[in-house]
Amino acid sequence: TITPAALLYYHVHYYGGTGFPSVEFNLADTVTYRQISSSARVSYFRALQDGDFKEMGDQVVYSFNVAWGLP
């Protein structure tokens, strides 16, 4: 099952700035087999305000994790 999500970030006095610097949209999926689970996530970050975050531009980030649970 693919799970969509959105995160709106808010900072207070972070590097001298306050407000909504960026928003993230992502899709994630987790697969479990016995004691092993793997998850994948694709995220898209968009800068909303001027400043340090705006200089980075839009970003696409992919992550993949594998975990093993102890019995």
Image (spheres, rainbow, N blue to C red):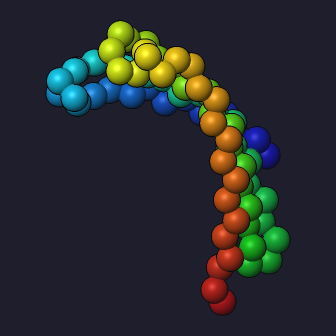
Q: How many marks?
A: 0
Q: Is residue 61 left or right of residue 53?
A: right
Name the residue: 74% across, 61% down.
Answer: 38
Residue 23 locus on image (x, y percent): 48, 23
Q: Is residue 33 left or right of residue 12?
A: right
Please say if 52 is above or below 33.
above
Q: Is residue 30 left or right of residue 10?
A: right
Q: In the rendered image, which quarter is residue 66 located in? A: bottom right
Please say if 44 is above or below 39.
above
Residue 71 locus on image (x, y percent): 66, 89
47 or 20, which lies in front?
47
Q: Residue furthest front?
A: 55
Q: Residue furthest top?
A: 50
Q: Residue furthest bottom?
A: 71
Q: In the rendered image, which quarter is residue 51 located in? A: top left
Name the residue: 44% across, 16% down.
Answer: 55
Q: Is residue 35 left or right of residue 52?
A: right
Please say if 22 is above or below 62.
above
Name the residue: 63% across, 86% down.
Answer: 70
Residue 25 locus on image (x, y percent): 59, 27
Name the residue: 72% across, 49% down.
Answer: 40
Residue 60 locus on image (x, y percent): 64, 29
